[in-house]
Image (tube, rainbow, N blue to C red):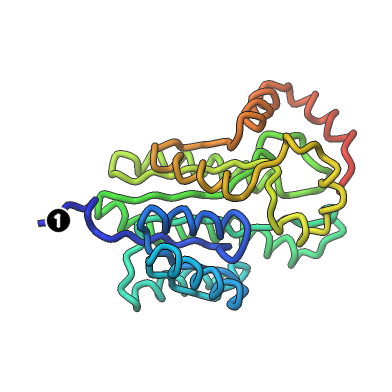
Amino acid sequence: MSNQSDLPKTVLITGASAGIGKELAHVFARHQFDVILVARRQDKLEAVAADIKQRYGQMAYVLTENLADPAAPQRIFDWCQEHKLAVDALVNNAGYALHSEFLEASWQSHLDFMQVLNISVVHLCHLFAPAMKERGYGRIINLASIAAWSPQLKGNLYGAAKSFIVDFSQAIDLELQPHGVHCTALCPGFTFSEFHDVMGTRGQVSKLPRFLWMTADEVAQEGFNAVMEGKSVHVTGRVNQGLTQVMSMLPSSVKHYLSKQQKVM
């Protein structure tokens, strides 16, 4: 009889059409995971799926969903059930940032943002973790950011949303770890990806020194290693690790002062 470790495994990745999500799909496939790719852009997903099949010979499924829709997590879970796909690893990578101050953005914009970055993450974990616990094996990566420790941008919800992801990931890791399920809050800093192009901040962030940046592949590989090692929080890169240590020691009054000096990009 085969052990659980000998059986084929499957990872489900949201935001898998580009950037860190796409690279995480490649990393998991290189380690013999079949992949379920979830995002809004079907053409991009199909290209990623074809590349994975050709390179690694793993199964690659495409599921087009918009996580701003509160019903999307349940549809994703139901689709996996219908196709008899057991999800052994879950990567909640989908995300973006609002390029405006709090009162300038509509309530619907904030609602969609929180749905994608926070509520859908919690919902997908709640849907898929029970079966992982029952099987005695599971890996969950939730994309956070070093913004969870940094001074806040005026009126911006991004840092608060990522702080929630860090705390939430640690909480469920404490619950699930005794059952063979590990959850990691993956916290990258500046990463070469489409993120800044979509947000319209490429010109501003490109002025930052090269040593502050990592590639999406580097972030993905560190994230995979971290969750396999059972780390509940992992900050990518030595520079980012140093920055978060410094920022975590700053008094709240100092952080607030630094926040006042910042400008929204």
Residue farthest along the front direction in this orientation:
55
Name the residue beneath numbered marker 1. Answer: 2
> Which is more toward the observer, 110 or 128?
128
Q: Nearer the viewer, residue 218 or 105?
A: 218
Q: Using residue 85 as the reference point, say whether residue 220 is left or right of it.
A: right
Q: Quadrant of the N terminus?
A: bottom left
Residue 124, image x, y percentages: 47, 60
Residue drawn where x is 35% and y is 44% of the image: 176
Q: At 74% from the left edge and 67% from the top edge, which residue is drawn?
A: 108
Q: Position of residue 242 (x, y in %)?
A: 65, 25
Q: Is residue 70 above or below residue 117?
A: below
Q: Quadrant of residue 208?
A: top right
Dot 1: element:
loop
Q: Amino acid at mark 1?
A: Ser
Instruction: Tell me residue 166's x, y (percent).
Output: 56, 41
In the image, residue 265 above or below residue 84: above
On screen, residue 105 versus residue 163, left or right, reads right
Residue at (71, 41) in percent of width and height: 213
Q: Nearer the viewer, residue 147 or 240?
A: 240
